[in-house]
Image (cartoon, rainbow, N blue to C red):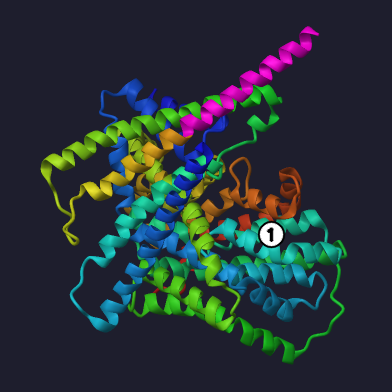
Amino acid sequence: MTGVLLFGSFAFFLAIGVPVSISLGVATMFTMVMQFDLSLGVIAQRMFAAMDSTSIMAIPFFVLAGNLMTAGGISRRLVDFSNRIVGNIRGGMSLALVLSCAFFAALSGSAPATVVAIGVMLYPDMVRLGYPKERTAGLLVVSGGLGPIIPPSIIMIVYATLTGASVGNMFKAGIVAGVLIVISLMIVVVFISNKEQWPKNEGSFSSGDLWKSFLNAVPALLLPIIILGGIYSGFFTATEAASVSVVWALLVGVFVYKELEPKSLWSIILSSGKSAAMVLFIIATSTAFSWLFTFSGLAGVMVGTITEMNLSSTLYCLVVALILLLFGTFLEGVATCVLLVPVLWPIAQSLGIDAIHFGMIVSISNVVGTMTPPVAVNIFSAASVTNLSMGKIVKGELPFFFAYLVCFLVVVLFPKISLILIK
Amino acid sequence: MFKKALKYLQKIEDSVLVVTFSVMVISFFMQVINRNVIKASVSWFEELSRYCMMYMAFLGAEAGLRDGTQISVSALTDKLPPFPRALVLLVARLIVIIFAVVIFVTSLSMLRLQIRSGQLSPALKIPMIIPYFSITFSFGIICGTQIAQWIVIFLLLVKEGANASEGRGV
């Protein structure tokens, strides 16, 4: 009964257009009033406790760093560099799109931010050159999914906060999965672009131009090296690395690229603050939701049911992947993580599943949710960049989406892939 | 006059957001520098950033709720004809208001508890009521702005409804 109330009311509030964050909070409140004799003060208490966390602070920092980078002219240089590498074969700009998204993902931890930053740069040009609109938008949605996979990554930070896994190791595993996804997407792009006769660039390859565009991109490409190098050498924590990347983005934008005007700083900080607050607020209310989920015994029932099935660790990983995909389709990614990881992780632990491997399953499934309607932030973002309808983008993304799912399955089934870079 | 006051309030809210966010970044960056280079015994950088984040997060949530940028599902409501759609969205907003009022009221008792215990924060040694107040403050504003918006939309709907029925009468 409690479960029906909690999830039913949540679904209802969501359906009538209440924002995701509030739906989570109000469903918690509603269930508490109907089923339990508890003080509602717990909700505010939980929301406060969720925000009283140092590791969560990495999220606003990475959002701000990403926005500073975009405003500072970084995306254009990354796109330019990618275009010099792969732009000259058939469908080359699509390959450049995938590669730019991968580079940008190494600066930003968010999928929609990646979609917008690269989409704005490449989409209009690609359409002008005759690339099919729907396919390009679809590819953008799926490539944007690299944002939370290639480090830094918001979802990995949330996961590590919940389970105590090492953020550094999560990031290492993310690199491997990211490379796997980039390669798979590129193979699909080459295949489709030849089949559908996508345009080919007129220019020819020049190593001089490549070198020049590389030099231009160096200050941007140095950032991931600073972040990851800093974390792995123990020089700073993930949150500290995030604050360093804000300062680096600022310095590069103002002094190296000279495109970031001090005047525009105010509005960049303001808009980054608002979009980071959206994620943080969802973490706050889903922490309350997740508390009731555990407190009411629902989580226990779920754990009991799964344990009774006596699954092997591989099968359990598959089941978890399915559950996460299902929840991720309707719930916002961070909320899914906050809600389900505290429930599913202890079982995984008892089955001897590695925390990093499990974290990769959580992270990648989370990204899949950003590409599938109804709650699909990547598609929303792509729609705002391309002015195409959601349905058309979904149609266009299908082949790339399947490639992504295959990569996901491979990561789920073979723990070794996540652990390759970790001793 | 009224509009001017609103604009002014908006500016104040924006400023709080920008200032808390900036302090967060600077303070945390100082901690990195301090820990690795200067090595002075300052322990409050991290706490200051954390408390700033609370104000930033909850105030930012207010801004997002007001301008409608908080993620919500519009797939179903978009399919409705304009008038029922407006009604459903009015109900949705009412739910936001209920949530905000409850959080605001319950946070008051949280504050009372903090005042009575007089607890100080571990590093900064400021009263714990200051970080807790972030919830009361932001949800107070959420209540105000959401109720005001609700009334505006409601009046607009009533006016439209009246116009529509008049149109049918003729």
Q: Main secondary structure of the magenta part?
A: helix
Q: Is residue B166 left or right of residue A282?
A: right
Residue A36 in magenta stretch = no
Residue at (84, 82) in percent of width and height: A203
Task: Look at 63% across and 63% down and name the residue there.
Answer: A117
- Residue reaching furthest left? B117
Q: Position of residue A231 (x, y in %)?
A: 38, 75
Asked whether A151 or A254 is in front, the reply is A254
The residue carrying pointer 1 sits among few (fewer than 14), some (14 to 19) or many (20 or more) residues within 10 Å by Cα, namely many
Number of callouts: 1
Quarter residue A208 falls in: bottom right
Give the amino acid type for the residue marked by disc 1 in the picture.
Leu
Give the residue pinned by disc 1: A140
In the image, is residue B165 above or below residue A369? above
| Residue B38 percent coordinates (x, y) | 25, 82
In terms of image quadrants, where is residue B111? top left
Chain at tag 1 = A
Q: Using residue A231 as the reference point, say whether residue A252 is left or right of it.
A: right
Residue at the spot 46% in from the left edge and 36% down from the top edge: B145
View extreme (front): residue: B1
**A114 or A398, nearer to the observer:** A114
Q: Per the image, is B147 magenta?
A: yes
Q: Position of residue B27 (x, y in %)?
A: 32, 68
The answer to whether residue A135 shows anywhere in this view is yes
Span colored in magenta: B146-170
Element marked by disc 1: helix
